[in-house]
Amino acid sequence: MIGTDGTAAIDLNADLGEGFGNWRMGDDAALLDVVTSANVACGFHAGDPVTMRRTCRLAAERGVSVGAHVGYRDLAGFGRRFVDVAPEELAADVLYQLGALDACARAAGTCVRYVKPHGALYNTLVHHEEQAAAVVDAVREFDPALPVLGLPGAVWLRLAAEAGLPVRHEAFADRAYTPEGTLVSRREPNAVLHDPALIAERGLTLATRGEVVAVDGSVVRLRADSICVHGDTPGAVEAARALRAGLERAGVRPRAFAA
Amino acid sequence: MIGTDGTAAIDLNADLGEGFGNWRMGDDAALLDVVTSANVACGFHAGDPVTMRRTCRLAAERGVSVGAHVGYRDLAGFGRRFVDVAPEELAADVLYQLGALDACARAAGTCVRYVKPHGALYNTLVHHEEQAAAVVDAVREFDPALPVLGLPGAVWLRLAAEAGLPVRHEAFADRAYTPEGTLVSRREPNAVLHDPALIAERGLTLATRGEVVAVDGSVVRLRADSICVHGDTPGAVEAARALRAGLERAGVRPRAFAA
Amino acid sequence: MIGTDGTAAIDLNADLGEGFGNWRMGDDAALLDVVTSANVACGFHAGDPVTMRRTCRLAAERGVSVGAHVGYRDLAGFGRRFVDVAPEELAADVLYQLGALDACARAAGTCVRYVKPHGALYNTLVHHEEQAAAVVDAVREFDPALPVLGLPGAVWLRLAAEAGLPVRHEAFADRAYTPEGTLVSRREPNAVLHDPALIAERGLTLATRGEVVAVDGSVVRLRADSICVHGDTPGAVEAARALRAGLERAGVRPRAFAA
Amino acid sequence: MIGTDGTAAIDLNADLGEGFGNWRMGDDAALLDVVTSANVACGFHAGDPVTMRRTCRLAAERGVSVGAHVGYRDLAGFGRRFVDVAPEELAADVLYQLGALDACARAAGTCVRYVKPHGALYNTLVHHEEQAAAVVDAVREFDPALPVLGLPGAVWLRLAAEAGLPVRHEAFADRAYTPEGTLVSRREPNAVLHDPALIAERGLTLATRGEVVAVDGSVVRLRADSICVHGDTPGAVEAARALRAGLERAGVRPRAFAA
């Protein structure tokens, strides 16, 4: 995307702070040198308060924007299992997580700058009207100017836009796309790409032309305010680094969409 | 205590929002008509997000100040068991609870106006220097002007004062006092008073003269910014009502110490 | 149903031990004098270990059979929210709950004598093949001779029967039935009956003739090994008592289906 | 120790199954090839039901004895924080964990063969009479013939012996000892040894002569039925392997103390 100052820029986001208590997950230190936006777990699917504070502090030190990675209350399932929670309960759960993370962020000299749902909630909000409306309500109650980040076409982003929340879209450089611009299910072979060079190239095309090559070879137009990168495998971190390096070489500046 | 406007006034505080999920506890509706300050559970020892939001809304509607009733992370023990948590962890846990409740309070049109520790944390902070310092750090990081409420003589209130936090003291109209001005242990017989008329009389003496009659008959001077009332038994609610009625008849206005 | 000794008998079951920590729910003492089978919560949706032990002890003292009331891991939702848990995880969760309750029951001189799913799991197992198979696997691994209790027609009972588990069916004297013999949804008016005399009469007809009058007036045949009673309201306990008294007056002996 | 068959043998135990949900900890696969007894987390400080079942299955396949590694209910603190839990509650918590793990073990064709407390509970039971008595009560109620494993001199082992439970003692090949035979605190430098060769040598001396060289150079006699090894660092696994290899070269057979 072309920034208001005429230079090309793109946000890079990743999930961070996904440990809990004595348990660690992912290579936060490595990712924080790659991304411009950190989706920080808020304690419901991962992320104890100590981890949240530390992650916010590290992000703030690097100028990385803190986003609230809100999820279902499900530590045992890491927020990856759909929970048929009533709208009133989901709205309260999200509001609670937003406030908790914001306190940690403010103690680190920053604040929550956007919201991105995690795991099963992320997937559910693509189509589930009631839960989508509940999350939008919670975000608006917390801060009616807080940007939300999600998948193009998601129901919850439509509702967020109708509610006046700034809507940002993300794309994936390491995921295969259908000709319709949706993600190929992880159950399909080749749904996830692993080649760092290919991922870097696709990321650059997303950032500069807003396009991605679908599984049938067709070119799909995708609006991407942010590219999501992963750090859960050594290869993923390497690919994220390659993606960033490729963007910088091409003159595309990694820049947080909300700062 | 005599207010700045020359009229006598006193705060009345009680623990509220102590349900969790499907479980209820106490008579919140009754207490909210008696008190001027609500110590609202923040999810660690009690209080799910739906309950927190509802309690904040009810408090806001009645002009009752919302305080953060922070506790150990111990739902199974209702926060009544000492946990030897490291200072860094306790500080993060308190900061997290403050932020979570504040988000609920702000959605209800108010905000967290003071902090009061719950249960075993309340008792521990009377003497435990490290945990006391951790809680003070957390409150100061959240808001360096946020009042703290506790027992006269508690270590954590001394540290809070040194850190510049406004310190408020509470007294108990339904508890027996030693000649030294400390509470008689609940393990002693007669540690807790049940007669509504006697409780009302003691509350009035606390509010107007800052005095309480100790178990040996001596008169102890006690600074009380707030009187703590209880609602966990039908008799307790009745006593709280009698206390408030007695104050009002004597021209002492129930007024939140932080509003 | 007519017992092997020629006398009429029926089981009465109720949910018990549904407190958690400091929170209480239901009138266990009253229900234990009415029922012959106690569905005891196992810690995942309700029921801390102290409550579980106490409930097993009280049941054992009264000769009431202990059943495992297994549920989703969801204290905040009281197990009433569907969780899309993978079969392997659900099987392990159920096995864990069975073992935990059995240890409590054995310490009380008895043991787990049957299994009945709780809440959202109960409803899900009526139709969800994968979760149904997982629960059946868990029960069989725990004890291939352990009876299972559920709704006639439920998928999980069919799978349980195929797996060789003894299958028992329950009916509801306080719920309206469709002409097809299924329960009228709680969302419909009149889905739940409240008149103790009517509930007692329907219970007697269920126990002696295996019949219930549906909402359209037709008579539906229902095999009932057990009648489920409730204790979550004062009226419910009264109705349960009336039901038992009616059965006894008619010569139908309340008797556990598994003892 | 010299076995009843005249050959030298010693047990090797390690903590296993310490993941939770999506989080992993330690190298279980490597340790299971080294030890003869597996202390398996039971869900209160670590160990979800899926992990418990898998760990039991892997242990059973290798002929490794399953022990219940019971802990405080404290996932966020990994059971490493003292909790001032009442005896009745602790006893119920331990009984619950024993039953839950036993069900997982039995589904794997084995059963719980001993009990070893974890973390802060391990340390507390060395001196805390009330909590010690509670744990002994729970073990006895679960199985009055179940062996308990702990530190020589611990209060809870004295009470266990008085209650008729088989008592087994463990020693540490990678920890420094005082001349009195107690462990040097981890806060001291050199409290933990890291040199695999030295650890192997100390383990062999413990196994064959029941002796260890203390920090002042004196020789301390220690009864060791089992040597505790660790797997939380790559070096620890290497040291554990060296210890086992050294024992086997010297003709000391690694053998579970309870099988």
Image (cartoon, coloured by chain):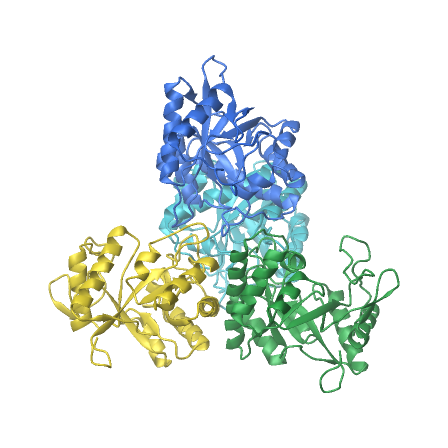
Chain colours: A blue, B cyan, C green, D yellow
Q: Quadrant of residue D46?
A: bottom left
Q: Residue D163 location in percent, x, y?
A: 38, 80
Please identify the quadrant where the N terminus of chain B is shown.
top right
Label count reads 0
Depth check: give the residue in front, C195 or B63.
C195
Q: Looking at this view, name the residue that lies furthest to the bottom.
A: C5
| Observer-nearest of D81 and C220 | C220
- Of residues A188 and A208, the one nearer the viewer is A188
Across and down, in percent, residue C8 comes to 76, 82
* Residue at far right of view: C217
Q: Is residue A257 above or below residue A77?
A: above
Image coordinates of residue D224 in percent, x first then y, are 24, 71
In the picture, residue D129 is in which quadrant?
bottom left
Image quarter of the C terminus of chain B? top right
* Residue B110 visible, this angle: no
Give the side of residue C188 with respect to residue A92, left or right: right
- Farthest-out residue, left: D217
Answer above or below: position of D170 versus B83: below
**Which residue appears at 45% of the width and 41% of the height?**
B139
